[in-house]
Image: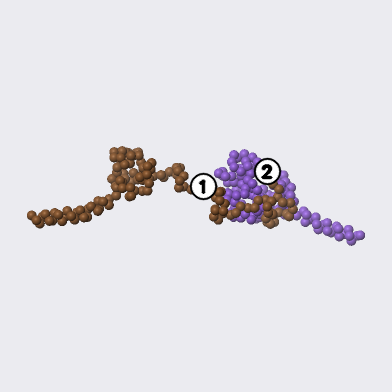
Amino acid sequence: MRKPLSLLAASTALSAAIGFPGWSAEPTLMEPGLMEPGLMEPGVMAPGVMEPGVMAPGGTPVLAMPGTAAEADLLVLASGDDDDDDDDDDHHDDEDDEDECDDDDDGCGRRRPDPAPAGTVAPPANGLFGTGAPPQVKVN
Amino acid sequence: MKSLLATLALTTALTLPSLALARPVTLTTTLTNYGGDGAYLALYVTDPSGAYAGSLWMAGGKSKYYEHLADWYRATAGDPAQINGITGASVGAGRSLEITLDLADALFDAGYTLHIDAAVEEMRDSPNEIAVPLTAAGAGQPVKGRRYIASFRYDM
């Protein structure tokens, strides 16, 4: 009787030693540290993502098992901001870059300097101009 | 007395051509009412082979926009030395820009062409909007542009 008992105890201990860490390491949607950044932020998640029984748009169950297609759908729903026409927080288009340069002309890297306005220096010696009167300009 | 007159005639004959090497030429560019901000205009000349010969005027003082004057920019790489002393303000829609320059006679009836590139912020660029041969006969003849320039003409 002692032998089967000790065998049972040993196998139980072995199962616990191997199985418990593995079980703990299984990722779940309820662990914030394993999710994509921002998944837990209010307003970013799909509505009702933490509530059992609630369905996401399109009928996807919001409590999906890890590693399933439903989980992939959820992650897309939660993190997906694929459209380009939203927020302006991290996006910088060309015009924004140009506007930044407006305020600080010296801070715009390798951009060429602005030319000298007419009247401040002589026209360039490109052979097109005579040595007579300086340029005259009028806007009507 | 005879030798004095001869000397006077000779000096006069030598002086007159040098005075006639350049002449004032007025370039008038009238813009359409395109409904946008002020237009940047690059006026420049190409030689008989089509190579860039030099700039005559730049309307618009911010070098960061020059790349939109595509043909001029390609020829000059936006070098401000090309337009130092011949740069003024951009020109508003519907306005008329009149520039009088002392231009070399050698530019006329010698195969040179005057070009204008135009650009307006947030609107389509218009390189080579005007391309007009510089000839004495062409003076005073208005030329129509494609997009922003209603008419251009030069008078001398």
Classed neighbour count for the residue bearing mark 2: other residues with Cα under 10 Å, few (<14), some (14–19), many (≥20):
some
Chain A: drawing colour: brown
Quadrant of the rendering where the C terminus of chain A is positioned: top right
Disc number for residue B41:
none
Q: Amino acid at mark 2?
A: Val
Q: Is residue A82 above or below residue A7?
A: above
Whether tag 2 and tag 1 are in contact, CB under 8 A, the answer is: no
Give the farthest residue toward the right. Answer: B1
Q: Label 2: chain?
A: A
Residue at 59% from the left image edge and 41% from the top image edge: B36
Judged from the image, the secondary structure of the residue bearing numbered disc 1 is helix
Q: Answer left or right for B11 relative to A77.
A: right
Q: Answer left or right for B33 relative to A6.
A: right
Residues under labels 2 and 1: Cα distance? 31 Å
Q: Which residue is mark 2?
A: A139
x, y percent for residue B22: 74, 53
Quadrant of the rendering where the N terminus of chain A is positioned: bottom left
Residue at 60% from the left image edge and 54% from the top image edge: A113
- Res A50 → quadrant: top left
Judged from the image, the secondary structure of the residue bearing numbered disc 2 is strand
Chain B: drawing colour: purple
Q: Can residue A129 be seen here?
A: yes
x, y percent for residue B96: 67, 42
Disc number for residue A96:
1
